[in-house]
């Protein structure tokens, strides 16, 4: 059990750093609420804009991957729940109140895949996808914060034990 707790706390530390860096790039990329085709076209015409865009997509994808594929399974194991498929874990996390909507998280995964694996050429489509991803950042952070809050109250931190 100590090893499972240690793994959970290490993942919480990692996802905390990912959340911090993701929020930083959100603040730098989305300086206005008007994310439309003109904005998307403009952001993709400068090296700095492209770098920020790629940074956002990478950080969003990384935090989403780490949370779904590592943090949720480690958390469920640490609290004595059965670890299953991604869908099983999301459904269990939803029932426990750590994820607001398992189906929305699956849609988030599909959006992540689209942003990472497809080159979205239409500026309006790109703007819509980026808006959706930006709007999902609070959900990612809320899940992390809820798990962290629970862990602080109920799970010993063994990360400093060697």
Image (tube, helix red, strand yellow):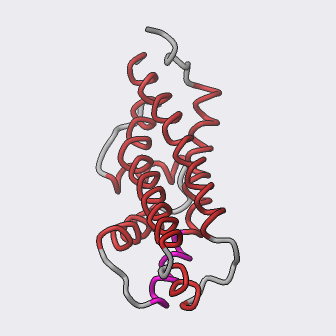
- Residue drawn 48% across and 80% down? 44
Q: Residue furthest right?
A: 32
Query: What is the magenta range?
Result: 123-133
In the image, residue 11 lies at what x, y percent? 46, 35
Task: Say if 94 sits above or below 104 in the image.
Answer: above
Whether residue 135 is in magenta: the answer is no
Task: Say if 1 sits above or below 55 in the image.
Answer: above
- Residue drawn 69% across and 78% down? 33
**Which of the 4 image quadrants contains residue 71?**
top left
Task: Say if 91 sits above or below 36 in the image.
Answer: above
Left or right of 43, for residue 76: left
Residue nearer the viewer, 109 or 115 = 115
In the image, residue 14 lies at what x, y percent? 49, 37
Task: Say if 45 sits above or below 15 in the image.
Answer: below
Give the main secondary structure of the magenta stretch: helix
Residue nearer the viewer, 150 or 118 = 118
Left or right of 116, for residue 126: right
Screen quadrant of the C terminus: top left
In the image, residue 127 lies at what x, y percent? 52, 83
**Which of the 4 image quadrants contains residue 25?**
bottom right
- Residue drawn 58% across and 30% down? 151
Residue nearer the viewer, 144 or 41 = 41
Whether residue 127 is in magenta: the answer is yes
């Amino acid at each position: 059990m100590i090893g499972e707790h240690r793994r959970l706390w290490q993942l919480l530390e990692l996802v905390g750093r990912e959340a911090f860096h993701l929020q930083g790039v959100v603040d730098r990329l989305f300086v206005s609420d008007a994310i439309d085709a003109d904005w998307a076209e403009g952001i993709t015409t400068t090296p700095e804009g492209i770098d920020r865009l790629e940074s956002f997509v990478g950080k969003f994808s990384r935090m989403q991957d780490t949370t779904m594929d590592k943090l949720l399974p480690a958390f469920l194991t640490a609290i004595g729940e059965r670890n299953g498929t991604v869908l099983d874990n999301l459904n269990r996390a939803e029932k426990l109140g750590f994820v607001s909507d398992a189906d929305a998280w699956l849609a988030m995964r599909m959006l992540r895949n689209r942003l990472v694996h497809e080159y979205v050429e239409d500026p309006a489509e790109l703007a819509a996808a980026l808006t959706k991803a930006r709007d999902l950042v609070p959900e990612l952070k809320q899940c992390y914060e809820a798990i962290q809050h629970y862990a602080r109250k109920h799970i010993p931190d063994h990360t400093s034990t060697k």
